[in-house]
Image (cartoon, rainbow, N blue to C red):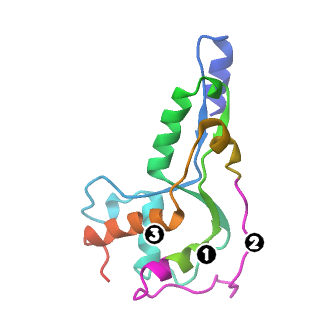
Amino acid sequence: EKAAWAHSATLAGKFDLVTILPPMVLGENKQLLGSVDDLNQSSLIMYKLLAGHMQFVMPGSVGFVDVTDVAKAHVLAAQVASAGGQRYMCSAESKTWLQVVDILRELYPSVQLPTTCADGSRTQPCLLLRNDKIKAELGMEFTPLKQTLRAQCDVLFRAGLLQL
C-alpha cells in the first residue's frame, strides 16, 4: 500500500488511488476444493476448527468481512468520485475468536469445538475496527458474520472436506 501511495503522489493528479483494507476475509470458496491443500488461510482456520484440529481457541480478536463485501467495496469506491485519495477499513464485525467459535457452535451443534484459549480463558477483550467511514462515504452495507461463516463452512461440508 505504501508503494501505491508513493507512486500515486509522483503522478500529481493523473492517477486516482483508493485503498480498501479488509482484515480477515471469509466467505464461500468459489474454486474447486479437492483437498485441504486447496484452501486459503482463512478457510484453513475454519477447517481446522471444525475438523477438531485445534484443541484451544486462538487468543485475540479480529475484524471479519465477507469476500463479496470486499468486492462490493471496490466497485463502490470506483463509482464514488469523492473516494479518490481515501483509505477505507472494510470490516463488517469485530469479534474475539471465542465469539466466533460460539457462532460456529450455534450453526453446527454436533461439531466438537474448543471452549477455551490455551490459558484457560473463556473471555477476551475485543478490538474495534470502525467501519462508519466506509458506510457513510460509500454507502457500504455488510453481510452479517453469522451468514458469512455459514457460507464459508457449508462449502467445506459440500466439498467433502468435513463431515457432520
Residue visible at 64% across and 82% down in the picture: 117
**Sequence-first tag of 2 and 1:** 1
Q: Which residues are magenta?
A: 104-129
Mark 3 highlights which residue?
A: 46
Between residues 30 and 107, which one lies in front from this camera angle?
107
Task: Identify the disc placed on residue 2.
Answer: none
Q: What separation in Å lies between label 2 and label 1 (alpha carbons)? A: 11 Å
Mark 2 highlights which residue?
A: 125
Q: Amino acid at mark 2?
A: Pro
Residue visible at 73% across and 62% down in the picture: 127
Q: Amino acid at mark 3?
A: Met
Tell me if 125 is positioned left or right of 112 in this view.
Answer: right
Q: What separation in Å lies between label 1 and label 3 (alpha carbons)? A: 13 Å
Where is residue 161? Give x, y as percent.
29, 72
Mark 3 is surrounded, within 10 Å at the Cα level, by few (under 14), some (14 to 19) or many (20 or more) other residues, namely some
Query: For residue 138: magenta?
Result: no
Mark 1 highlights which residue?
A: 99
